[in-house]
Image (spheres, grey):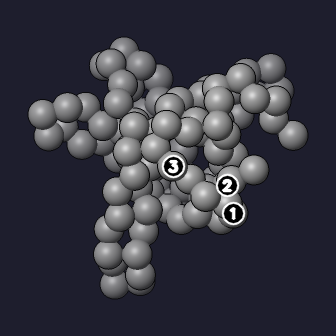
Amino acid sequence: MPKFHVRDTFEMATGRKLYVMVGHVVEGLIRAGMFVNVPCNAALNMTARIHSIEFARRFSGEEVGLCFEFEPEVLELWRNLSIANETLEISDGPCEAMT
């Protein structure tokens, strides 16, 4: 199963609301249309579909940005998760069993 290490997150408001997870691919191949799975606690996972993937060159190398489109209310929920320095699993569907 693909994995992505999130270094940080930010929002872009350039005509559309995008939430971006910036980091690097740890394992596997990640494509737009796949789903990121964020475990909140033992009983709850948040899942979101990857809208697009962007690349940014930095002094330390190239970073990958997984981009998500959210409505304002949903965006606020994701913002409040404060995801940083975490490795997340990526799946082909929102309901795949997580191992």
Can you see residue 9? Answer: no
Answer with left or right where residue 63 lies relative to residue 47: left
The amino acid pointed to by label 1 is Glu
Of the numbered discs 1 and 2, the one sitting upstream in the chain is 2
For disc 2, the marked residue is: 3
CA gap, disc 1 and disc 2: 5 Å
Residue under the image location 82 percent in, 30 percent down: 97
* Quadrant of the rendered image containing residue 54: bottom left
Q: Which mark is residue 8?
A: none
Of the numbered discs 3 and 2, the one sitting upstream in the chain is 2
- SS category of the residue bearing label 3: loop
Q: x, y percentage for residue 35? A: 58, 36
* Quadrant of the rendered image containing residue 98: top right
Image depth: mark 3 or mark 2 in front: 3
- SS category of the residue bearing label 2: strand
Disc 1 + disc 2, Cβ < 8 Å: yes
The amino acid pointed to by label 3 is Arg
The amino acid pointed to by label 2 is Lys
Is the residue marked by circle 3 packed among few (<14), some (14-19), or many (20+) residues within 10 Å? some
For disc 1, the marked residue is: 27
CA gap, disc 3 and disc 1: 13 Å
CA gap, disc 3 and disc 2: 12 Å
For disc 3, the marked residue is: 31
- SS category of the residue bearing label 1: strand
